[in-house]
Amino acid sequence: MNISLTPTLEKFVQDKVASGLYNSVSEVIREALRMMASKDKMSQERIAQLNQDIEEGWNDTVIFDGHSAMEKLIKKYE
């Protein structure tokens, strides 16, 4: 597989290898892809949790009856 990087990204990858943290460009790319996969998984989990929270909120919501509320207000302020 061949990939093309912008000069800025290529320098970033080369700097990572030169720092000694990685032995090769491939290691840098693999680590970046692992981090991307982890971020995607966390995003999916967060969306699932938000959807669950929304569903629970809808289920816990008291249905607002405008007519009854208006009658109560009228009686209160008559």
Image (tube, rainbow, N blue to C red):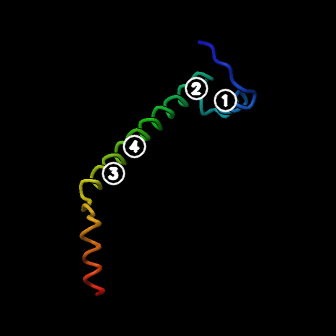
Measured Cα–Cα span from mark 1 to mark 4: 31 Å
* Residue located 63% across and 13% down the image: 2
Q: Which mark is residue 37?
A: none
Q: Does 4 sit above or below residue 21?
A: above
Tell me the number on the disc at residue 47.
Answer: 4
Locate residue 20: give its quadrant. top right
- Separation of disc 2 and disc 1 at Cα? 8 Å
Q: For the residues marked 4 and 3, what is the alpha-carbon distance in whole angstroms? A: 10 Å
> How many residues crowd around disc 3 within 10 Å: few (fewer than 14), some, or many (20 or more)?
few
Amino acid tagged 1:
Val
| Between 32 and 69, the one nearer to me in the picture | 69
Is the residue under label 4 in contact with that under label 1 (CB below 8 Å)? no
Element at badge 3?
Answer: helix
Q: Which of marks 2 and 4 is nearer the N terminus?
A: 2
**Horizontal side, residue 43 vs residue 58: left or right:** right
**In front of the other: 14 or 54:** 54
> Circle 3 sits on which residue?
54
